[in-house]
């Protein structure tokens, strides 16, 4: 199924890419190429769903369940912000020894914005230098996945995330 | 990281499908177009079957996962 907004999908998927590289499932050069394409706002003409097959397949399933023929922004956010966490908890049924906190997409509030960004997150204060959202200011809300800022979040979305994660 | 886990189908009764994943039996949902029968090897994510795999693929993944989760 086609992903309408490949940039948004990659903003959330790329932070997992280093794990895929370590496993040998994704080439390091490809990960760098994808990162560059986002940062330089270049056209992403790559089959990103195939590079991140589980996230791609899960977005397809979600889109179908939502009665959609394409993977749009709502589907991508529903997966990475809401369904992803359930899936991670599911995985911990099998591997309890793994710390999955970093894997979860979390909300964060900008405390300082500059070359690096200081975020207040549910895991404490974080200094971030991998940021897909170039124009941030103090008090903005963002989503964070591993050590990346994925995108700015509207306050309503943050409230929803906080309610879900209580 | 969105890892799917390898599993084996142990029961199919109508729409109810059970897969064994790392020694645990789970009721799973069929998320694909292909048909599923008892004995099939699959990739499962969040109790959703996302892909059918070969027996060889299953064995390789189990071996890799053992290494990964040591």
Image (cartoon, coloured by chain):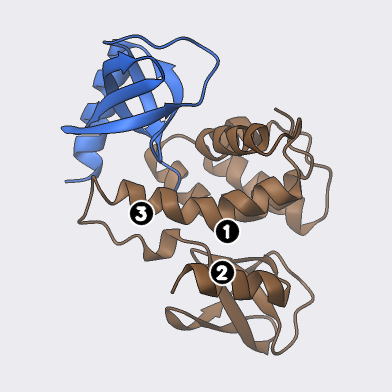
Chain colours: A brown, B blue
Q: How crowded is mark 1: few (under 14 residues within 10 Å), some or many (20 or more)?
A: many
List the residue tagged with mark 3.
Answer: A89
Q: Dot 1 falls on which chain?
A: A
Q: Could you tell me which residue is drawn at 23 percent across and 48 percent down?
A: A95
Q: For residue A81, which numbered disc appears in the image?
A: 1
Q: Can residue A14 be seen in this view?
A: no
Coordinates of residue A46 in the picture (x, y in percent): 72, 33
What separation in Å lies between label 2 and label 3 (alpha carbons)? Answer: 15 Å
Q: Helix, strand, or loop for circle 1?
A: helix
Quarter of the view holding residue A117 = bottom right
Q: Helix, strand, or loop for circle 3?
A: helix
The reply to the same-chain question for discs 3 and 1 is yes
Up the image or down, B62 lies above or below A89; here it is: above
| Residues at discs 1 and 2 in contact (Cβ within 8 Å) | yes
Coordinates of residue B46 in the picture (x, y in percent): 40, 41
Between A63 and A132, the residue placed more toward the observer is: A63
Coordinates of residue A70 in the picture (x, y in percent): 76, 34
For marks 1 and 2 on the same chain, the one whose residue lies earlier in the sequence = 1
Q: Could you tell me which residue is drawn at 63 percent across and 81 percent down?
A: A116
What separation in Å lies between label 3 and label 1 (alpha carbons)? Answer: 14 Å
For marks 2 and 3 on the same chain, the one whose residue lies earlier in the sequence = 3
For marks 3 and 1 on the same chain, the one whose residue lies earlier in the sequence = 1
List the residue tagged with mark 2.
Answer: A161
Coordinates of residue B39 in the picture (x, y in percent): 26, 10
What separation in Å lies between label 1 and label 2 (alpha carbons)? Answer: 7 Å
Q: Dot 2 falls on which chain?
A: A
Q: Helix, strand, or loop for circle 2?
A: helix
């Amino acid at each position: 199924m086609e992903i309408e907004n490949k940039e948004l999908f990659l903003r959330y998927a790329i932070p997992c890419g280093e794990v895929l590289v370590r496993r040998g499932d994704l080439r390091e050069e490809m990960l760098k190429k994808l990162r560059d394409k986002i940062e330089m706002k270049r056209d992403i003409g790559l089959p990103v769903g195939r590079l991140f097959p589980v996230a791609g397949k899960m977005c397809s399933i979600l889109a179908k369940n939502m009665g959609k023929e394409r993977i749009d922004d709502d589907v991508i956010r529903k997966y990475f912000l809401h369904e992803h966490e359930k899936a991670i908890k599911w995985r911990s049924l099998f591997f309890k020894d793994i710390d999955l906190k970093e894997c979860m997409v979390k909300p964060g509030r900008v405390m300082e914005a500059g070359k690096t960004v200081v975020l207040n997150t549910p895991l404490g204060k974080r200094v971030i230098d991998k940021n897909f959202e170039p124009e941030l200011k103090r008090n903005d809300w963002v989503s964070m996945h591993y050590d990346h800022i994925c995108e700015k979040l509207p306050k309503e979305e943050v409230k929803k995330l906080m309610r879900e994660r209580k | 990281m969105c890892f799917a886990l390898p599993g084996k189908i142990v029961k199919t009764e109508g729409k109810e499908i059970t897969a064994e994943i790392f020694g645990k039996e789970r009721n799973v949902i069929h998320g694909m177009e292909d048909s599923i029968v008892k004995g099939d090897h699959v990739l499962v994510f969040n109790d959703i079957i996302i892909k059918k795999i070969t027996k060889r693929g299953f064995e390789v993944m189990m071996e890799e996962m053992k290494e990964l989760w040591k």
